[in-house]
Each structure stands twice: as structure tokens, then as C-alpha cells.
Image (cartoon, helix red, strand yellow):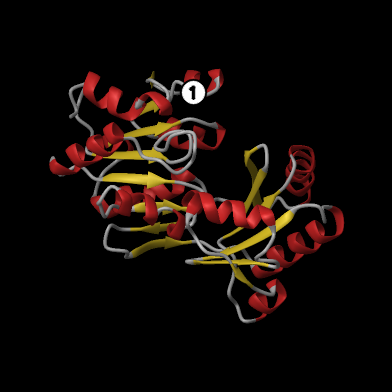
Amino acid sequence: MKTPKIIFSDIDGTFLKDDHMTVSHRTAEAVHAVLAQGIPFVLVSARMPEAIYPITDSIGVKIPVISYSGGLVLTDAGETLADVRMDASAASMVLSAVDEHFPVLTVNYYAGRRWYVQDTDDPRVRHEEHITHAQAERGNFDMLLSINTLPSKILLMGAPEPCKRAEHDLSAQFPMLHVVRSSPNLVEIMQAGVSKESGIRALLDHYGLTAKDALAFGDNYNDLEMLQFAGTSVAMGNAPDDVKEAASRVTESNEEDGIWAYLKEHKII
């Protein structure tokens, strides 16, 4: 196949092993080999930058990142290419709706490079800190909105059943927002129009490239837009069958160094 001019990869379930923290030796080797050829390698995730940089630091690279599933796009030097926040009134209404109808869920308020919660001792928050190495801080959401510190993303954490209901109900109630579960226990809420595709477009424009130049790796439903947009798309072996069907090709699982295996098989590295 034609050597790509840029490579995009989802993080959890794709770039990382199942512990959501570890980059395998072969995956790290693949990134270094790609960069040595002058091909940008970009991590794409719902995570905030501070939950991505510990990963890149662990393998000794500085690369572009697409955070908040496209809401915040940063170059390898940290330059901001896109920063799409939620509308203040929509954010206020959705926070009130969650408070009223889904009080069992933990609310996380991400604003650019900052992560605010109501209770830093919440076990769900502590668990997320452990996985991502990012640090939450206590914040009053109404106060943040009043000083125009608008959210890049609101993340709801909880048991699968209330998360499922929250996704359904909030999607119907707030069409101006993009509401999607990124796992059974997580509901991501962002401004409508924000997607991994929109983030990729910003980086392609920055490099003067097109979708045909791009290779993308992903493993789940929130990667579908990215996989369908990229010129060549690769689903991980651990992806659901319909995600595999949407991709150009399928590689090994994240536990089996799927990114490295694909790049080796196709002589890209």
C-alpha cells in the first residue's frame, strides 16, 4: 500500500494495552520508526491533554494531540489549532438536568487544560486520576460559567444503566450538544459538531494534507467517524464486528501490538 503521510491513532483500546496505561515496547518502537521517516503520528482521544502527555512522555516523543474527541487540537509544539467549547447556556442547562435527573452520576467539567470536579475524594475521580495521571481540582461549575471558563467537555461517570439512560435522555433534550457513551460507564458531552473527524481536519489543514493521505487506527464506536474519514482505516482485532466492517482493514488487538503488526506487515516501518 502507499505509505501514509500522517497517522492517527485512538488511545484506549488501540494505542494502550487493556490497563489503559501501558504502551507496549513494540508500539513505542513503531511510533519512533514512523517519526524517523518524517511522518507525523497523532494521538486522538476523548482525554484531556494532561491525560495524554504522560503517555507521550513515557515513550520520549513530542507529537500532536487531538483531545476531547476533536474539541482541542494541539501541535507537537503545543500550539492550539482548534479549541471548541460548549455554549454557556447549553452547559448550564445540561448541568441542571444531570443534577436533577441523574444525581447518582459523577460530573467532571473539563475546560482546556483544567479538570474540575465537585469532590476530589470521589472514588470515581480518584480512579480516573490513577489511570490518566491527570489531576482534578475542586471547582464550582456555576462560578466557572459565570467567569466564562466554558467547558470543552462534561464527562459523566457511573454505573452502566444510569449512563445509558443519561445518554438517551440528554441526547433527546439537548440537540445542540453531542452526547455519546465512550464506555458503559462514561458519557461524554460536547458541543455539537465536535468529532474526531473535525479534529483530524484541523491537523490535515495545518500540514497541507488531505484525508487520502491519512491512516487511522481505532477500536470502538466513537472512532467510526475517524475511520470512515481517513483514506485508509484500520480496526483493531478487539473492535466490535461492525467497527471492523466500517474499516478498510483489520489488524491484531491492542494486546497483540496491532499498530506495530499492521505497520510491519505493510512495510511502513
Which is more toward the observer, 244 or 251?
251
- The reply to whether residue 155 is visible in this rendering is no
Residue 264's place in the image compared with 9, above or below, is above
Query: Against 62, is 43 above or below?
Result: above
Residue located beneath label 1 in the image: 238
Q: 36 above or below 244?
A: below
Question: Residue visible at 79% across and 57% down?
Answer: 98
Question: Nearest the camera: 73 or 254?
Answer: 254
Could you tell me residue 138's position as x and y percent? 64, 72
Could you tell me residue 127's position as x and y percent?
60, 51
Residue at 42% over, 38% down: 16
Which residue extends farthest right? 100
* Quadrant location, the C terminus: top left
Residue at the bottom extreme of this rendering: 147
Q: Quadrant of residue 253?
A: top left
Q: Report the residue that reaches farthest toward the left.
A: 37
- Give the residue drawn at x 69%, y 64%: 91
* Image quadrant containing the N terminus: top left
**Image x and y of residue 121, in percent:** 67, 63
Q: Amino acid at mark 1?
A: Asn
Q: Position of residue 257 (x, y in %)?
A: 34, 27
What element does badge 1 sit on?
loop
Point 48% across, 30% down: residue: 219
- How many marks are shown on the rendered structure? 1
Asked if one can make out residue 224 in the rendered structure from this viewpoint, the answer is yes
Category of crowding for the residue at label 1, using alpha-carbon neighbours closer than 10 angstroms: few (below 14), some (14–19), many (at least 20) = many
